[in-house]
Image: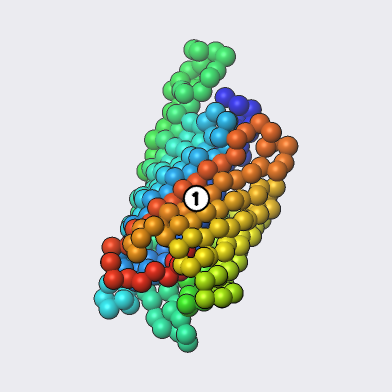
Amino acid sequence: MNQLVISILIMLFPLQVYGQMFPTSDHYVHNPLAINPAFAGCHDALSATILYRNQWVGFKDAPKSQILSFHTPVAHDRIGLGLLVERNSIGIFKETNFIGNYAYRMELQNGKLALGLGFGITANNSAWNELDIADADDAQLLDNSSYTVLPAFSFGTYYYTKKYFIGISIPLFLSYDLDNSTGKYKNGNTFSGSNYFVTGGYEIGISNIVKLLPSLLIKYHPGNAVQIDFNTQVNLNDRVGMGIGYRNRDVLIGMLQCQLSYQLSMSYSYNFELGSVGQYMNGSHEIVLNYVFRFERKVIGPRQF
């Protein structure tokens, strides 16, 4: 296994404290339910989203993510309900989340304010026996594979109008300590493994055909450097969006979004690694498909907030 990947595994999964994985994603504008349960129902119709991300192409055992989500408004649009199924993997570590989402929405000035909760389970598999080891009879590794199922909770708030949005969330915020005497995990209640997200965007009308959407994502994790994504997308005639972004870890992002029909949209992004690591990989790919189950719904452009 590549030395870089091993180093990342050690940083992400310390022996004593377990914090749920949270992968990088370029399309937080088009798939916000993945990081904020308050988004449930905000498409004003039953909506389904599929996301696939292949990160650091060229590295063996590099991170991969698959997400399937559904959400819809109910109770005269006051309540939003959603389901999120997410699978993340890096090396020998695999995590699957099954999260139900509940959002309560209320009118506020010219927009809507939503408060959301996510609740479900996280299933983790650490297959130490899949490592390439020098000593094939090392019992410490061969017998140390584990499978655990733990509760998972998320919290978020989301405010949006026809022109802008802002969200604050703490997805999958529980962390766990390993009890060496029993070999089981217990809730740590320290928030040391939590991710804190702030998102925002504003649509600027340049003309009847051209619209500009600058957006921002800030991710904070205790003990790690703050991650900031700056993205700008140009929307042409509510049909095609082209954008560029920069992540403050020497990553340049190219984006393309197409409204294929009244109901179906597709988004794609490619990451260019600008640092020294970039010469050893072929970038990262991410694709998102979204389908809205209501034909009479008018196209609102690639932003979809």
Q: Residue at left 42%, top 49%?
A: 51
Could you tell me residue 162's position as x and y percent? 47, 77
* Picture quarter with the C terminus: bottom left
In the rendered picture of this protein, how many numbered marks are placed on residues? 1
Q: Residue at left 60%, top 35%?
A: 282
* Picture quarter with the N terminus: top right
Could you tell me residue 123's position as x and y percent? 38, 42
Foreground pick, 129 / 164:
164
Q: Residue at left 44%, top 37%?
A: 94
Could you tell me residue 141's position as x and y percent? 49, 22
In the displayed structure, 263 sits above or below 64; it is: below
Could you tell me residue 247's position as x and y percent? 65, 53
* 82 relative to 185 in the view: left or right: left
Q: Answer yes or no: is residue 164 visible.
A: no
The residue most toward the bottom is 109
Look at mark 1 in the image and give the residue it sits on.
268
Indicate the amino acid at tag 1.
Tyr
* 113 relative to 245 in the view: left or right: left
In the displayed structure, 72 sits above or below 128; it is: below
